[in-house]
Image (spheres, rainbow, N blue to C red):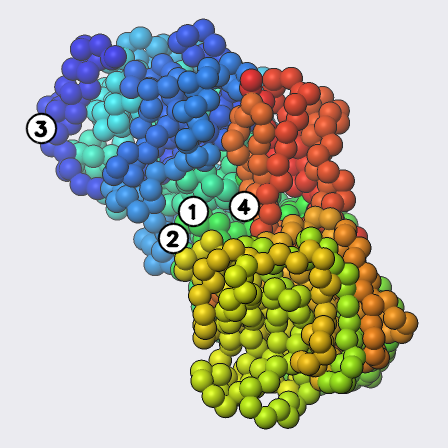
Amino acid sequence: MPSLSKVLAVIVACLACYFGGNLGPCSIQAQTLLRGPANPEPVVWDQPDGTQITVRLFGDEHGHFAETMDGYTLVRSADGDAWMYAERVVDGHLRPAEMMAHEVALRTPEERQFLNGTGLHLRADPRVPVPELLRHKHSPDAQPSVLQRMLSEAQGNQVELNVPVLLVGFEDLKATVPKTTIEAMMTETGWDGGINSPGSFKDYLLEVSYGQVSINADVFGWYDDPESYQVYGERYGTQALHGLVWRAIEAADAEGADFSKYDNDGDGQCDGLVVIHAGYGASEYGDTRLIWPQARGLQGSREVDGVSFGRFGISSELSHGRQAGIGTHMHEFLHVYGNLPDLYDLDGSSRGIGMWDIMAGGSWLGDGVAPPHLSAWSKKRIGWIQPNEVQTSGTYSFPAVEQDPSAIFQTALSPNSPFEYFLLEYRKQTGWDQLLPGSGLLIWHVDESSPDNQDETRNLVDLEEADGRDDLDHRRNRGDAGDMFPGTSSNLNFTHTSYPSTRSYVHPGAPSQVAILDIASTGSSGSASIVQIGNTRIDFLSDRQTGHAPMQVAFTNKSSGNDFAAWSWDFEGKGVAGSTEQSPKWTYEVPGYYTVKLSAQLTLENISDIWLSSTRDQYIRVFDGNSALFMDSEDAYGEIPSHASLDMTETMTIEAWVRPEKLDFSGSETATIIDKDSYSLHVQKSQVGPLQGDSFVLSIVDDLNQKSTWSTPSGSVEFDTWQHIAVVLDLGSFAAPVRLLINGQPQSIAVRGNLSSALKGHASKPVRIGNRGDRTAAFEGTIDELRIWNKSRTDAEFNDFLNSRIIGDIRVLDGLVGYWPMNEGSGSVFKDESLIANHGKITGSWGAGAPVSQMRVNISENDVTRIEEIAVYPNYPNPFGISTTIPILVPEPMAITVEVYNVLGQLVHSVMEDQLFPHGRHEIKMQPDHLANGVYMYSIRMKTAQGVSQTIPGTMAIVR
């Protein structure tokens, strides 16, 4: 617990500020607080029990927190000495639980039990009201900063900025860096400081402002404040900082400072204060006894030397075991004098724009010694550059932005989004950008209707990462060479259909009106064609997307908005032009999945040989086989030998594609689809009772020979048309023991009878298709793709293979006990492709098969959510003793390999290799019994049928 003297010191300091005291009257009003970002690198902390723990720090508007390396949220203990696991209280805030955090291998059984009930990445409820004091908001009409006003008045001349720097120590923490060293850091040309700094504070401003801003820094101090440094730390809040700054102002005034000198723009206010305190800052190690670097308005209306005081920035003297570089000092300075917002993600759910701007994670680049340039948007906001607005299509050159302020280009997305645009700049590894991971073109997506960078789906300033990995959004790194164009992914184009794309945040469904093509980089400069495409769209349709080989497809060109000069079609995704016609036909001879790309050469005034394209991945699917069982309503039928797996069970699914001919029965008649004595699925026509019209009917005979029936609505059978019919049994369900679905849509059903006895087993009886054993209920039409499952399939599961044949390794298809695709087309055998291999025989003829993949039936959006992209969720529990589970979402059939590695990168466990998973939600269970306690990495490689693979890493810990 904090000592009484420390608590009283805080109270005295706050009362002194509130009531005036030596500081003058205080205006108690909400002030904007801007903070420096937390140290992005892992830090090691000594816990009070003698153990050490490695944590990652995060800062947000609620305060500051950390995470263990395996993702559990931590907050500091009340006395600030320990990292404790976080828990969320009723009002939505985080507080320390009564459980000290430890490394994975050192966690006690009680600790592991506590974590099993705690989610990873715990955050305060975003709906909790946050005082405006702790929130920074940006809006397009924000008040101009000091630098903006002065640059405007200078009319192209250099601005000389006078800046006061106040150095403060504490009663129990003295400074170690001499004042003369601080003076050199602020203004000495080429200052290195023994820490390999590229230059001084003044050098940085001269370079990044293109010589428009120079500073004269007057350094005052060191002054030893009479209070403990802990009085001003995060543990007690930060209100006492106002007293600290006022006392430093008084000390500097007594030393001879003339604060009127620092009213650079003549508005009667000292424009800002740079305050450097002794010791380290809380953002480096998360120690709440220390001061978190920040910028804020100074409370108090007192004047000194005829001027009032506005904002101050405060940061630490030391960092990384030596004098702090200029990174964090400059970050806070630009808050104060440039009115720039933070561009990191305040809640830590992403990296914001990472190292690419000093107003984000760039303030820590080179451990804070060599911060990079500001992003194009920050330079625009502060007034150092005026981007070249692209009005016409053309090929543009991009000199390195570090030396040329005219090298930044701006292009709008759409007239419908006035606050949304792209900024383009070429960044080079030179000067203050020397530690960037590469050189290339950066494309910034700006949405000035968004307040900040806290929502990674719609940031104020977002970097379009050229490699499409979205590492910044997913916190995988702070930026890499793949973020630049062309970059490591050799991405040359940025269009409406590429990824990343030019799509608008504000109008995501509307195509943008700009494309950036043929991006090139020489290492020192770049070029690109910026095309104002207006309403130009490249688009196409086809008369079919799926069918059986050979399959001819007629493509219709739907492109518009330009007088196109030429066309090029790539029908098979091989990069080979298959046609130059506007709307061609193409025949697919070989089964498979095909990507189709249409490219169009534009007719433009200022630029030639510009092509736009539209690509549809796996757009065409071609299957082999094109046959089915044809029934003539007389003596044709198919027969499947008896097997116990085909008996009626309490959980069962039967599905098939059928194309019935028109029935011509009198009275009550049936036409059999599948029959096994104890159950029958058939088409029925009746003019009596509830069965008015043609319906699909399921009948079940129980052990007492009592028959019950379930029928779809009258008129639900369509003739001369392929339909998918499915029966789902879940007899233990009170709500829906029997369901009938047509084309994936659940049907309302009429019920007759009461299935009150046990099910009737007939393991010795065969399954008949198209007719009963006595041949009295023949089906006239075609039957295809019969599948039987020993489970109750969900509506969502039907979507997996509803529109296609089942392909790949069916061993992973849970519950499939019979699958007859009926692709043979000749002979008397139709094969069962399930593991049971219970092949059937046909007495009759073959007909044209169900064009399964042409049916394109859709499950209602109310019944199933279609999975559009891969998702892999953290394994749970983690850590674990016996087994752990990884939930995944699979958008299409994929072969999945899962491997486990130790910390040396050695393969120690193989979970599965190229195991086929269909579309849907799945869980991968790992039970590595032979592995010792410790931390392991696992990789999940997911490969499509075309061989396109994606690998997703994860971390797990074993504690037994």
- Mark 1–mark 2 Cα distance, whole angstroms, equals 8 Å
The residue shown at (59%, 43%) is 923
Total labels: the figure holds 4
Q: Nearer the viewer, mark 1 or mark 2?
A: 1
Q: Which numbered marker is on residue 451?
A: 2
Q: Earlier in the sequence, mark 4 or mark 2?
A: 2
The residue shown at (27%, 28%) is 238
- Residue 633 percent coordinates (x, y): 73, 85
- The residue that label 4 is drawn on is 473
Q: Residue furthest right?
A: 827
The residue shown at (58%, 39%) is 886
- The residue that label 1 is drawn on is 454
User: Do the residues bearing badges 1 and 2 touch, measured as CB atoms within 8 Å?
Assistant: yes
- Mark 3–mark 1 Cα distance, whole angstroms, equals 37 Å
Q: In this orientation, which residue lies closer to the viewer: 654 or 417?
A: 654
Q: Which numbered marker is on residue 19?
A: 3
Say which amino acid is labelled 4. Answer: Asp
Say which amino acid is labelled 1. Answer: Gln
- Residue 2 percent coordinates (x, y): 24, 13
Question: Would you say residue 666 is visible in this rendering?
Answer: yes
